Image: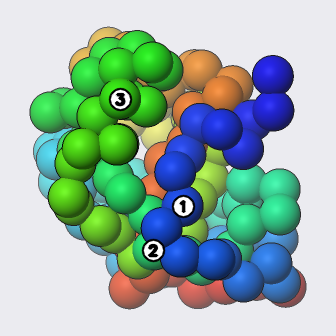
Amino acid sequence: MDPHYSAIGVSCPEPQQHSVEIVATPAGEAPLWVREAWIGLTLPLWPGYARGTWRSAGVLSSPRTRWGAFWASLFDRKRTTGYLVPSAQAIRLLAAHSPEAADWWRTHTGFADDEYMGFIFDAPACRPID
């Protein structure tokens, strides 16, 4: 399965950067301490994608399955400008930095370790790295 089908892009992303450094607390539904744990990490971008505007859903309010997320993305009107990161890779990197925060993601979401799902980190929280 092509992993590019796990996110529905709204605008054409710029394919230049390969990773982002999280430099500020990302927006989102996770508790503040969990979101703060991302700060300082360098995360890989989804291959072929850089900054874009994406249809998105909150990690707690979104469906728990890949297909549920896909269907919700077709009807959800929320848009987030930011960077698409493979969630499973991000969680592995987070676990090395903050095992408690990684455990929170695994416990409270149904897709944290899914190789075909992604997180969208909002642009103000990121510094692109070439």
Residue 37 percent coordinates (x, y): 39, 53
Q: Which residue is mark 2?
A: 53
- Rendering quarter of residue 103: top left
Residue 122 percent coordinates (x, y): 39, 72
- Rendering quarter of residue 48: bottom right
Residue 107 percent coordinates (x, y): 32, 14
Q: Is residue 77 above or below residue 70?
A: below
Q: Which residue is mark 3?
A: 71
The disc at residue 68 is: none
Badge 1, how many Cα within 10 Å: few under 14, some, many 20+?
A: some
Give the residue type at disc 3: Trp
Residue shown at 60% from the left, 20% from the top: 114
In the displayed structure, does residue 65 sit left or right of residue 92? Answer: left
- Rendering quarter of residue 74: top left
Residue 17: tell me if it is visible. Answer: no
Q: CA distance from mark 3 to mark 1?
A: 14 Å
Q: Nearer the viewer, residue 93 or 97?
A: 93
Q: Tags 1 and 2 in contact by the CB under 8 Å rule?
A: yes
Give the residue type at disc 1: Gly
Q: CA distance from mark 1 to mark 2?
A: 7 Å
Judge depth for marks 3 and 2 and give the one in front.
3
Q: Is residue 57 above or below residue 25?
A: above
